[in-house]
Amino acid sequence: MLRNELEIIEQKTLAPYAFKSADSRGRKFDEEKHPYRTDFQRDRDRIIHSTAFRRLEYKTQVFVNHEGDHFRTRLTHTIEVSQISRTIARALRLNEDLTEAIALAHDLGHTPFGHSGEDALNELMADTGGFEHNRQSLRVIDLLERRYPQFKGLNLSYEIREGIVKHETDYDNPSHQDFRPDEAPLLECQIVNFADEIAYNAHDLDDGLESGLLSDDDVNQLGVWKELSIQVKNSYPDLPDGMRHRQVVRLLLNMEVTSVVGQSLSNIAKLGIKNIDDVRACKSKILGFSDDMLERHKEIKKFLLDRMYRHYRMVRMGDKAKRIMRELFETYLKDPNQMPSSALEREEPLGVKKLIADYIAGMTDRFALQEYKKLFDPFERV
């Protein structure tokens, strides 16, 4: 099927308030259209083939990579967000390709060691505007990826780039002054915000149980977990604990996604959203949970903060990660020639600190730990 045929199908089948690929504001550098992929399909493929995407395999979600093979990484989290995003987009008749591309790119700029690494780099860069991983994701796709002779970066469509910088959750509040801040984000972008939160709530509960940081007694303090666990036990009384936990997580994901779809359709009707102009002009969030699900969602987040993220093992991991980030940064700042020449060859208007931040942010957990050993362990080969 040819691209123009796919664009016609979008016009005929997607909701009037869905964003159509043929309406894109385009790329920074003009390129000839692809014969059988829409612009957003092409963007999705460029993201998947990028170096930054591959590095997500060895970047922390919650547990540092060497803690175990079965815990989520930044890559598996990204894939889960993408899958949830596509499910919601399809149910709402929105543009799946655009939604998927935003989801796949939303964490490309994340540091090693998860939010602990980001917090450390933000403190170290405080005098030069700080560090925020959504802005860094845009920097990755606009500047740091070098795959094409015609331009720097991946030259993605405006809507993908906008979706990255307007990605907002409790942990993500980027500035987006260069992307028409008076315009509300597209619904495809709003989906990724919810999918991100749905994914990490569910998989952090799952990983917390798998790691032993959480117990059955702990999670049964959550009303929604206890309710779903009883439901699973009634259906399958002899399931081993691990299987039961996974069934509860599956039901929780379905419950949250179903709530977003139902409530969002109701909100769209109530707000009178008829087209893209209505979406752009709307001052309130269009997508959302039902009131009941929102309370349950908040309860899960508070529980994870109190019982898991503040667990002494997590605090130790986070403090260790920050120490590694600080010492790497300070060593490179003292003598930038300790970085490879490839990290220094680019001219950077914001100075050497920005070059160092780009280099460290691009590291995987594994590489950062190896680099730390090479710099500070006298018996390690450099």
Image (cartoon, helix red, strand yellow):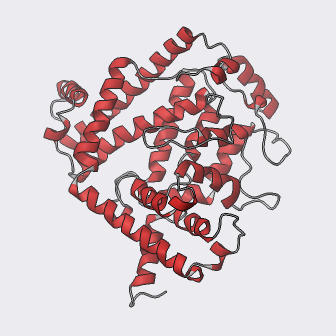
Residue 320: x %, y % from top left: 33, 66
**Residue 121 visible in the current orientation:** yes
Number of marks drawn: 0
Q: Is residue 7 above or below residue 244?
A: above
Query: Residue 5, percent across and down?
Result: 79, 27
Q: Quadrant of residue 109?
A: bottom right
Q: Quadrant of the N terminus?
A: top right
Residue 2 in view in this figure: no
Image coordinates for residue 156, horizontal then vertical, percent: 72, 46
Q: Residue at x 78, y 30 (%)?
A: 22
Residue 188, image x and y in percent? 59, 30
> Quarter-wise, where is residue 175 in the image?
top right
Q: Which residue ends up furthest to the left in the rendered image?
A: 217
Residue for point 72% across, 27% down: 20
Residue at the spot x=61%, y=24% of the render? 94
Q: Is residue 73 left or right of residue 265?
A: left
- Which residue ends up furthest to the front in the rendered image? 127
